[in-house]
Amino acid sequence: MRPAPTRCPICQSELTVARLHCSSCDTTLEGNFVSGQFSNLTPEQMEFVFTFVRCEGKINRMEQEVGLSYPTIRNRLHEVIRALGYEPGKDESPEIDAEKRSSTIADLEAGKITAEQAMRILRGEEE
């Protein structure tokens, strides 16, 4: 069985699933169904995702398995993330320098700030 196309071959608009059929009991459902976010991925991107999962998300294992460099694998991962509707790195915490981290921990230990304030500072939410 081949995967269902996700784009119209004529105008390239997104296709919707209009009919589902069970070959076991011969039940058919008709309507408009969404395909899910993974339907936005190209076959190459889906293969990348399968390999990534098989390698447990470890890029160094991906390098060995697919014979590509770390930057190339990271770029392909970012392409997949964008195709799924997200922006890579958006949810990452900003880098806090070692001096700020040390002073924040010292302030926490001295009772100058609460644990909640320290967490916000370390996440970059407040100065």
Image: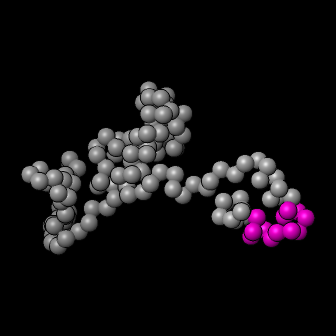
Is 60 covered by the magenta stretch?
no
Give percent across and percent down for residue 15.
18, 59
Residue 27 visible in the current orientation: no
Residue at 44%, 54% in the rendered image? 87
Q: Is residue 98 left or right of residue 37?
A: right
Give the color scheme: rainbow, by chain, secondary structure or one colour.
one colour
The total of numbered circles placed on residues is: 0
Residue in the foreground of this view, choosing between 98 and 39:
98
Quick check: 27 above or below 104? below
Could you say where residue 22 lies in the image, as x and y percent from the top left?
A: 19, 64
Residue span colored magenta? 107-118
Q: Is residue 43 visible?
A: yes
- Picture layout, residue 37 above or below residue 50: below
Q: Residue 12: x and y, percent? A: 16, 52
Q: Is residue 109 left or right of residue 8?
A: right
> In percent of the image, x 47 and y 39: which residue is there?
74
- The structure residue drawn at horizontal position 44% and vertical position 33%, both measured from the top left corner, is 72
- Residue lying at the far left in this picture: please name it: 10
Please identify the residue farthest to the front as the structure is shown: 127
Q: Nearer the viewer, residue 40 or 49?
A: 40
Q: Quadrant of the C terminus?
A: bottom right
The answer to whether residue 13 is above or below residue 76 is: below
Residue 77 at x, y percent in the picture: 43, 43
Front residue of 33/75: it is 75
Task: Write the residue at 35% across / 52% down.
Answer: 83
